Image (cartoon, rainbow, N blue to C red):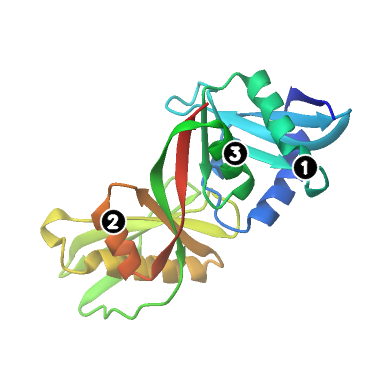
């Protein structure tokens, strides 16, 4: 089977992306790359039949198109996935590849074709509810000019001791958590309390909470685990 690749628009690959996200069944960190026009799309065809797609963006600079981050082939044609990936790589001329380790097809391509592979970030999914007491602290919504940002603050005695929020620019129904505790109040369990409250806020919005942190951020990892998250994968990068 001969695979050809054609640079195309997001609208052309959207039906295939819907199948990819359904099969992936988790938070897809790079989803916003398409929403904001940070990626190029490539249609994959076998003997003229559309069978999948690939997406490329900039590993360090958004204007660049030097890293394959998305690759999908319909199950009926997946036996030719290697040929399709080779055609995509040749057409896009990308020196890098990155993927979520829970994206099994692209992860297989990464381990087969890449070198200098390393984990850049840890991915977390919600695993259990926590019940940390609020005490005399108050939890309240904050304001934001970004429609995809739902912020909150945690106060005590009228002072803000932590802030955070939910980013909604990921594939539905997922929401990505972020938070920060003021320096003088760190190592007091407030971070885990923030995670707990943000998870509740996500479910109130009919979203599934998710999170990630840098592979070297041991404190953030410990806080997310204490807040009821569990590791579900990693963001992997490599050189082609």
- Figure quadrant of residue 81: top right
- Please give left or right for residue 34 compared with residue 6 in the image: left
Of labels 3 and 2, earlier in sequence is 3
Tags 3 and 2 touching, CB below 8 Å: no
- Residues under labels 3 and 1: Cα distance? 30 Å
- Count of marks placed on residues: 3
Give coordinates of residue 213: x percent, y percent.
36, 50
Of labels 3 and 1, earlier in sequence is 3
Quick one: 69 or 166, which is closer to the camera? 69
- Please give left or right for residue 122 compared with residue 194 in the image: right
Label drawn at residue 35: 3
- Please give left or right for residue 176 compared with residue 18 in the image: left
Quick one: 97 or 25, which is closer to the camera? 97
Label drawn at residue 89: none
The quarter of the rendered structure image containing the N terminus is top right
Of labels 1 and 2, earlier in sequence is 1
Q: Residue furthest left?
A: 184
Quick one: 17 or 92, which is closer to the camera? 92
Look at the numbered disc 3 and give the secondary structure of its residue: helix
- Residues under labels 3 and 2: Cα distance? 28 Å
Q: Which residue is mark 2?
A: 220
Residue at coordinates 31% horizontally, 69% vertically from top-left? 226
Q: Which residue is mark 1?
A: 79
Depicted 183 relative to depicted 195: above or below? above
- Please give left or right for residue 79 compared with residue 206 in the image: right
Depicted 131 relative to depicted 145: above or below? below
Residue at coordinates 50% horizontally, 48% vertically from top-left? 147
């Amino acid at each position: 089977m001969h695979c050809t690749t054609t640079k195309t628009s997001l609208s052309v690959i959207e039906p295939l992306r819907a199948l990819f996200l359904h099969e992936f069944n988790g938070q897809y960190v790079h989803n916003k790359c398409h929403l904001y026009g940070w990626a190029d799309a490539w249609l994959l065809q076998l003997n003229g039949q559309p069978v999948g797609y690939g997406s490329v963006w900039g590993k360090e600079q958004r204007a660049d198109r030097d890293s394959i981050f998305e690759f999908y082939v319909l199950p009926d044609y997946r036996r030719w996935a290697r040929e399709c990936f080779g055609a995509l790589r040749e057409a896009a001329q990308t020196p890098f590849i990155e993927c979520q380790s829970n994206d099994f097809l692209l992860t297989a391509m990464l381990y087969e074709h890449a070198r200098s592979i390393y984990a850049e970030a840890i991915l977390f999914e919600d695993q259990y509810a926590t019940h940390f007491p609020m005490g005399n602290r108050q939890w309240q919504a904050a304001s934001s000019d970004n429609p995809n940002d739902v912020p909150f603050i945690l106060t005590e005695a009228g002072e803000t001791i932590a802030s955070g929020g939910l980013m909604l620019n990921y594939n539905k129904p997922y929401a990505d958590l972020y938070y920060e505790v003021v320096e003088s109040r760190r190592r007091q369990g407030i971070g885990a309390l923030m995670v707990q409250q943000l998870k509740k806020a996500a479910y109130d919005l009919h979203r599934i909470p998710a999170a990630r942190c840098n592979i070297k951020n041991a404190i953030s990892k410990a806080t997310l685990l204490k807040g009821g998250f569990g590791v579900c994968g990693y963001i992997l990068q490599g050189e082609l």
